[in-house]
Image (cartoon, rainbow, N blue to C red):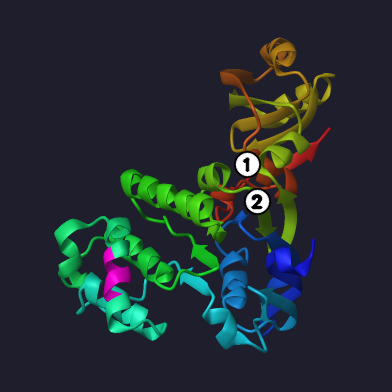
Amino acid sequence: MPESDVALSAEHVTRRFGDVVAVDDVSLALPRGEMYGFLGPNGAGKSTLTRVLCTLLTPSAGRAVVAGYDVSTQPKQVRLRVGVALQEAALDAKQTGLELLRLQGRFYGLSGGDARARADELAGLVDIGDALARPVATYSGGMKRRLDLALALVHRPEVLFLDEPTTGLDPVSRARVWEEVRRLNAEDGMTVFLTTQYLEEADALAHRVGIINQGRLVAEGTPDELKRAIGTDVVVVTLDGSVSTALDVLRATDVVQRVDTSGSTLTLSVSDGPAAVTPIAVALDRAPDVAVRDISLRRPSLDDVFLSVTGERIADKDDPEHPTAESR
């Protein structure tokens, strides 16, 4: 795509910390106005790449350009054009939310009157009522997250970086953040780079998704494209008894394309789910030392995509009992 249509690009970006490679030769490009979900477990490198793109870290190798400016050689120009809300909101607990919004406006060159007017505009986004006039020390975690998002928007950025913006929030607060992010993207045309561990968040919000694992970009596409790439349907079986015996039995069938295991749960990729359920159930019923506790049919999810490309489920990535993957 023409450079003028690109909001953000990374070309072979690598970031090392001593001997540890946190981001490993990542390349990607976001057109203006896209909502991009960057998906991965803790320690995968997604937050490190975010910090490189918003100039908080310099790349060890490669090049990144955001809003038309190089993050290494033109960091000040990048910072004037991006908004950033990181995992931990760095808020002065002694100031009120309103004071922080006005101060942020002044930092970005707004006049006193314009900063006050912009703070008033964003007060609806913060949605914490009279608490906006109270010190941040009195805020809940959800209130702090929403205030941090408002602060990132004071100067109307071209590109908004959200690094796990809803981690730790209750469902109501999370829904409010989702609603506002959708509005910013749809109505204001803001490009959004969203890192998350929440599969449903990426599925619900992102136009495209990139999956990072061990510092490398391992898959990229729309949520539907990624789901279709791993098969038509998924059969999930929960067992009592011998998993290894069940795997031997399933390998002998002609309906199962792939088997992924997580403890006593088997996730089976099949081309025709309704037709596959009965032969799978019959084969397992005849297997010695195997009892089927539950069997269900569903469409693939982003968690299935992550399992397919990494051999692990995102929720289990840091668990020593994380699953293994096998292909027939």
Decide which of 143, 192 is in the foreground and name it: 192
Q: Which residue bears the numbered disc 1?
A: 302
Residue contact at pointers 2 and 1, CB within 8 angstroms: yes
Dividing the picture into quarters, in which one does residue 151 lie?
bottom left
Residue located 77% across and 22% down the image: 249
Residue located 71% across and 63% down the image: 5
Decide which of 227, 67 is in the foreground and name it: 67
Q: Secondary structure at mark 2?
A: strand
Instruction: Answer few, some or many: residues within 10 Å of disc 2's Cα (few below 14, many 20 plus, some between 14 and 19).
Output: many
As shown in the figure, which amino acid type bears the numbered disc 1? Leu
Q: Which residue bears the numbered disc 2?
A: 209
Q: Is residue 97 above or below residue 218?
A: below
Horizontal side of residue 73 vs 81, given as left or right: right
Instruction: Answer few, some or many: residues within 10 Å of disc 1's Cα (few below 14, many 20 plus, some between 14 and 19).
Output: many
Give x and y (percent) for residue 169: 35, 53
Decide which of 239, 227 is in the foreground and name it: 227
Q: Is residue 303 above or below residue 50?
A: above
Q: Is residue 171 above or below residue 63?
A: above
Horizontal side of residue 76 vs 91, given as left or right: right
Q: Is residue 268 magenta?
A: no
The quarter of the picture where the N terminus appears is bottom right
Q: Is residue 257 visible?
A: yes
As shown in the figure, which amino acid type bears the numbered disc 2? Val
Q: Magenta segment, which residues?
A: 115-120
Q: Is residue 25 visible?
A: no
Q: Nearer the viewer, mark 2 or mark 1?
A: 2
The quarter of the picture where the C terminus appears is top right
Residue located 70% across and 76% down the image: 64
Give x and y (percent) for residue 75: 59, 86
Measured Cα–Cα span from mark 2 to mark 1:
9 Å
